[in-house]
Image (tube, helix red, strand yellow):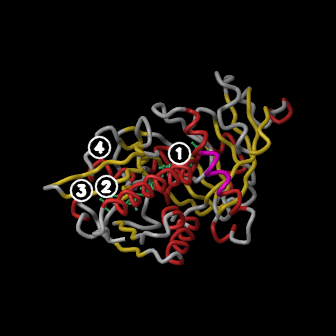
Amino acid sequence: LCIAETCPSGSVTVLSDQFSPDTTSDAAAGILIPHTYPGTPIHVQKQWFKETFTYLFAISNSAEASEAGIHLVSGWQVFKNSPKEELPFWSDIVLGFRLMSKAELQKFPQHQFGQAFTTLKCDCPPYLLWLEKRLKAAGVQIYTRKVADLWELHSEYNVVVNCTGIGARQLVGDEKLFPVRGQVLKVHAPWVKNFIRDGDGLTYIYPGIHRVTLGGTREKDNWSLAPDPGTTKDIFDRCCSLEPSLRGAQDIKVKVGLRPSRQHVRLQREVLSQGGVKLPVIHNYGHGAGGFSVHRGTAKEAARLVGECIAALQGSSSRAKL
Ligand SMILES: Cc1cc2nc3c(=O)[nH]c(=O)nc-3n(C[C@H](O)[C@H](O)[C@H](O)COP(=O)(O)OP(=O)(O)OC[C@H]3O[C@@H](n4cnc5c(N)ncnc54)[C@H](O)[C@@H]3O)c2cc1C
Ligand SMILES: O=C(O)CCC(=O)C(=O)O
């Protein structure tokens, strides 16, 4: 969508073997709280987060908000022991960041330190369906297709953008990319209005427009998409210990996703070449546990790289199929 919006001289086609509700993004809680990528400078990660926050904040403040599934949510991140960094790098991008008072911490007898703030949440599938609607409105073609090798696209397209998440491991043989399995519960508990996140990153409660997401797990190199009943009980018990009223939650649905994890997002241009024929590829995958938090920022950078490829093609060749 970002490419269609910023490179109007090109025509965009989306190819994917799976669509909502069967993607990793559909399993996510969709909260905007960054996860750090150890291999990317903090100022770059901060810029990606800021661009994403600003983009979604505008949607949350428009008539589209409920259809797009974007809303503000306030809550707490609580710690059993004080964290090394009391002020995370994103504290001046979320709204109203402050340390919790002693009185607030009384709600969490097992925790001794906390941060209160307001952030944004994307509800999925609604947000993905809204993006798809915007794609169609922008004239983008959408086809169901599994791509076995990027080179198979060279005769049909001038530039390829690879946003295949964990699928990139097989598609481009990236062994630096690994799955971190996450299981969550989506429950009906409309009285829960505030998010609660344990600072250890394992247990969280994120209220959405219709359902509350309860998490979670982080299992490196586990490829299983099958829900595990023992894990479901464990997640539920952990969340109830943070928010006892969840014992009354109903209609518990289980979702599993594989976080496409890497030391850093692969956001770069590569030129494939066979027999003198070239195919520019922009990679944009490996967003791990933070894809929602930085998606617009990384998409903007990918679109900028696509713009560079288009300019180079327009400059060098009249055979560009733009
Ligand atoms: C349980 C869980 C909770 C999470 N919660 C949050 C959160 O609260 N906040 C946050 O910021 N992040 C969260 N994340 C992380 C976030 O979900 C991911 O970073 C993000 O979804 C990755 O998006 P993606 O588009 O790269 O991958 P995907 O959503 O997996 O999309 C990749 C697409 O590529 C297609 N594809 C793959 N290979 C091929 C191929 N060979 N040919 C054709 N198509 C292909 C797939 O079908 C799919 O449609 C969570 C993740 C999990 C698992
Ligand atoms: O970590 C969080 O609190 C949000 C959920 C998430 O990003 C995840 O489970 O990967």
Q: CA distance from mark 1 to mark 2?
A: 26 Å
Q: Are discs 1 and 4 less than 8 Å apart at CB? A: no
| Residue with the mark numbered 4 | 174
Percent position of residue 135, x then y: 50, 72
Q: Quadrant of the C terminus?
A: bottom left
Q: Amino acid at mark 3?
A: Lys
Q: Between disc 1 and disc 4, whose residue precedes?
A: 4
| Residue with the mark numbered 2 | 280
Classify 15 as above or below 149.
Answer: below
Q: Amino acid at mark 2?
A: Pro
Q: Between disc 1 and disc 2, whose residue precedes?
A: 2
Q: Is mark 1 within 8 Å of ligand 1?
A: yes
Q: Amino acid at mark 4?
A: Asp
| Residue with the mark numbered 1 | 290
Instruction: Tell me what residue is drawn at x 59 percent, y 35 percent.
Output: 43
Q: Are discs 1 and 2 less than 8 Å apart at CB? A: no
